[in-house]
Image: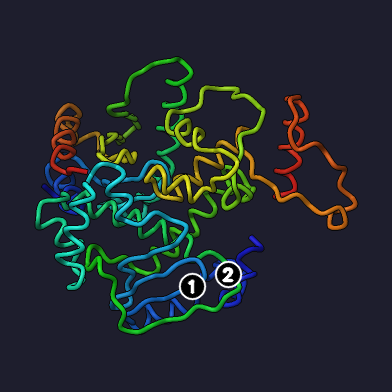
Amino acid sequence: MSAIAADPDAPATDRLPVLSPMLQRLAAERATGALMRDRGTLYLADGQVVHAESPATPGIDVLLTTGGTLRHEGWWDAVAQAGAGRRVGRYLVDSGHVPGGALELCHLGALYDAAFFALAPTGTPARFRYGVAHWIGPVRPVPVAAVERETLRRREFLDRIWPDPACDSAPLLRTAHGPDAPVPARQRRLLELVDGVRTASDIAQALGRSAFHILVDLRRLAAAGLVAAVRAQPLPAAATPRRIPLPEVTADPDIALLRRLRDALEAL
Amino acid sequence: MANTEASLKEAMSSIEGTTGVALVDYTSGMALGTLGGGKDFNLEVAAAGNTDVIRAKLRTMEHLGLKEEIEDILITLGTQYHLIRLLKTRGGNGLFLYLVLDSSRANLAMARHQLKKIEAELEV
């Protein structure tokens, strides 16, 4: 995708797009510290990714507490007891708050989720601070190559479902188009939160689900014509002259279908 | 209580005829852990592809109005069995265990039973 080429520290190559040459260098020199990029931070230890955070994704605390795995008090107890020693993860398991398997999976989920956003194309240069460690502490380190491979797979996966990223970051609204087929329960809960104001990240926070999962469901809902991004009203002068203006909301399903087709073709 | 790696190892060693096992996040198709497989059987590709199998079945059930849950899915090939076991997680995240068995060595009833036991120990 052309979006990858827009990343200044990721020059476009024909076959293997490099998400961040800086990250690869740090992996090669087995660096420890925090790689801060525009949309998130990757924490490295000995050149492996040990944690990741992004403002676009719910943190591991939200994933653990909203799902009911852990009570809020349990989380704050662990932060108070083990935060300073940077061993919160270990403490949660040792104190019996969270089963080891559950913590590991939740942590991996949060890591890959935040990494997907942190490694998104950006115009801002990345910075690395050596020696910085995250307070969650050691859980399960992941090789940089695995994180990059998974991030690329996720981008392709989203584009296969529905090639228009408009719904990924804008406020969302429900279209007038009714569902042609029953909407799965999980997508229904998501749809209930679509109110013209919330974005994908807001919904992920509210449901305590990983933001990438929300993007997957949103692209499916967009493909079914049930959800659309709120488009900023274009100024008359800024409007593209060649495009024939269509009403944004229409009750006619044929028009809705044609508009979705047009959007999909444009996004190709 | 077991971590994921221990559970995958147990599946590999205790279930007769197992040639590969993966723990997969159903929504993203990401393999959270794999063991076995090899050059001629890429478990990560299998993991991602089989999420479509589950999704198709779930959609059909929605269409039919069935209010049931999938416990497992069995796919029988010429020389292999592929067993998919959906896990009940506390966080509500869809996960499944994916097991590849050599059909000449495997005992299906035992394999299903043991996979159930591994799920119980995994505590996710």
Residues B124 and B43: in front is B124
In this picture, residue B7 sits left or right of residue A175: left
Number of dots carrying numbers:
2
Mark 1: which amino acid? Arg
Can the viewer see residue A169? yes
What residue does disc 1 label? A37
Residue A122: mark in rendering: 2
Q: Position of residue B14 (x, y in %)?
A: 12, 43
Q: Quadrant of residue A28?
A: bottom left
Q: Secondary structure at mark 2?
A: loop
| Position of residue B108 in the picture relative to residue A199 (left or right) | left
Q: Are marks 1 and 2 in contact (CB under 8 Å)?
A: yes
**Residue drawn 67% across and 28% down?**
A176
Residue drawn at x 45%, y 21% as measured from the top left: B62
Whichever of labels 1 and 2 marks the residue nearer the N terminus, that label is 1
Q: Residues within 10 Å of mark 1 (few under 14, many from 20)?
A: many
User: A67 or A9: which is nearer to us?
Assistant: A67
Q: Position of residue A152 (x, y in %)?
A: 50, 59
Residue in the picture at 54% in, 38% down: A194
